[in-house]
Amino acid sequence: MRNTFIFKPLIFLVLAAASTLINAAPVLNGLAVHSELGKEQFIAGLSVTTLSNSSRDILIVNEPKQIQVRVLIDRLSSRRFKRMWIEGMAINASSSELSEHAKHMAKFSNMLKMKLSAGDIFTIDRGSDQVNVYLNGVKLGDVPDVAFFDLLLRTWIGPVPLSSQFRDNLLVAGDIDNALLSRFDATFPSEDRIAEVEANVTNQEKSEPQVAAIVETPEPAIDATIAAPALGAGAIATAPKVAAPEVAAPGFPASTTTKPKPTPPPVAAATPKPTPKPTAAPQQQALLDADALEEEEDLDFTAESLLEQQLYIAKLKRYSYNYLSYPRRALDRGWEGNVRLNITIDRTGKVLEVVVVEESEYKTLTKEAVNAANKASPFPAMPDGLRGETFAFTLPVVFKIRSN
């Protein structure tokens, strides 16, 4: 009897502890600033229930998690913001995962209809049975599959993140720079902006499109068995063997976060011709202007059209990697770095423009990435199902020397 008396309280304590863990609110694991064309775009926040510096552990754990974007730039076009997620998923997921979540990704992309403004807070919340999406505390919609959240999260902390530094800053297990945390806390929308979002969402709900069911297609463009280099990101030119660079393949299994409060708290180049030069402000501005013009033509996705686009993006990136090599001068000096390009092609695959979105500190590496993009022309032609006369995609390149 006495042993039973002791045993029951122990069971109660274990169950209580488990319940507390399950219902625990996520806390900030890390913050990172994303920049393009030398200008800060937003502060990204990753919140988790169990603090960790391991991307794999965070991705596979079955706990509440939250992604948050706090916008710094005056205007962030919905088209550009949407493309960040579409491209990120295309290069961090296998073809089977893209097919499985095509309907979810189409629904998510179609939620992103408003251009974002400085102070906006965009939140993706992984609940117990669905993924909820909010802008300034106003719900934009939901996706009935929590595994979709972890697929989105791979675009930030998976094999091919926005940048290696961006990923590293999100994986600091709560050891966040105080100055950056203060900026994050001070970035929030005005009451007028919240009201504007509420009105916009109400209007959109009146004409919400239906998302078409996915039609299976024997597209072989993505091979999930490509070997992933350790700590790689994007196209990787490695040394000392200067051969075709390896492609970072997804290596994270799908996993099985707190609701944001309704009112957001105060807690976000060049155009190379035959011999391009990596930087030129007029063309960088042209890229931004194109976003502004194209935003009006940004049409809704169906699951089938989105899948076709993602498979094509992955195919273009795989193709371009064949033209990358490690510059001998950089290799001899031990230079490493990241380069990010925005490439525009026509329907035949001919390169029309290459803009350097992120430069390496070593011009030799930036020049090699730009030259590789131009040598790859013509890229595979645009599929018949993709609309438009041109197609733009982002190519992330990492130059990293590996010892064998």
Image: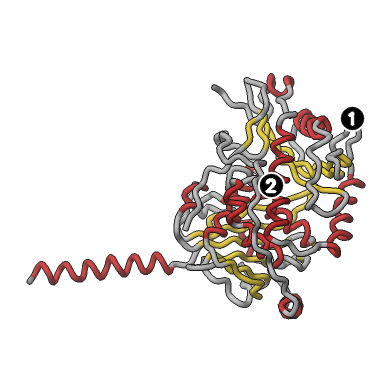
- Mark 2 or mark 1: name the one nearer the start of the chain: 1
Label 1, secondary structure: give it: loop
Q: Position of residue 39 (x, y in %)?
A: 78, 51
Given the image, on which type of amino acid does mark 1 rest?
Answer: Thr
Quarter of the image for the C terminus: give it: top right
Q: Is residue 348 left or right of residue 28?
A: right
Residue 269 visible from this viewpoint: no
Label 2, secondary structure: give it: helix
Task: Determine which quarter of the picture holds residue 107.
Answer: bottom right
Q: Is residue 147 left or right of residue 120?
A: left
Camera-near label (2 vs 1) is 2
Q: State the separation of the CA atoms marked 2 and 1.
A: 30 Å
Within-10-Å neighbours for mark 1: few <14, some 14–19, many 20+: few
Q: What number is the disc on residue 275? A: 1
Q: Position of residue 388 (x, y in %)?
A: 86, 53
Disc 2 target residue: 311
Q: Position of residue 293 (x, y in %)?
A: 89, 60
Residue sitting at x 54%, y 63%: 145
The colouring scheme, among rainbow, by chain, secondary structure or one colour, is: secondary structure
Q: Position of residue 285 (x, y in %)?
A: 88, 51
Q: What number is the disc on residue 106? A: none
In this rendered view, identify the residue nearer to me: 377 or 78.
377
* Tags 2 and 1 touching, CB below 8 Å: no
Residue sitting at x 55%, y 67%: 144
Residue 281 visible from this viewpoint: yes
Residue sitting at x 23%, y 67%: 11
Q: Is residue 233 above or below residue 96?
A: above
Q: Is residue 270 above or below residue 209?
A: above
Residue sitting at x 74%, y 20%: 329
Quarter of the image for the N terminus: give it: bottom left
Given the image, on which type of amino acid does mark 2 rest?
Answer: Leu
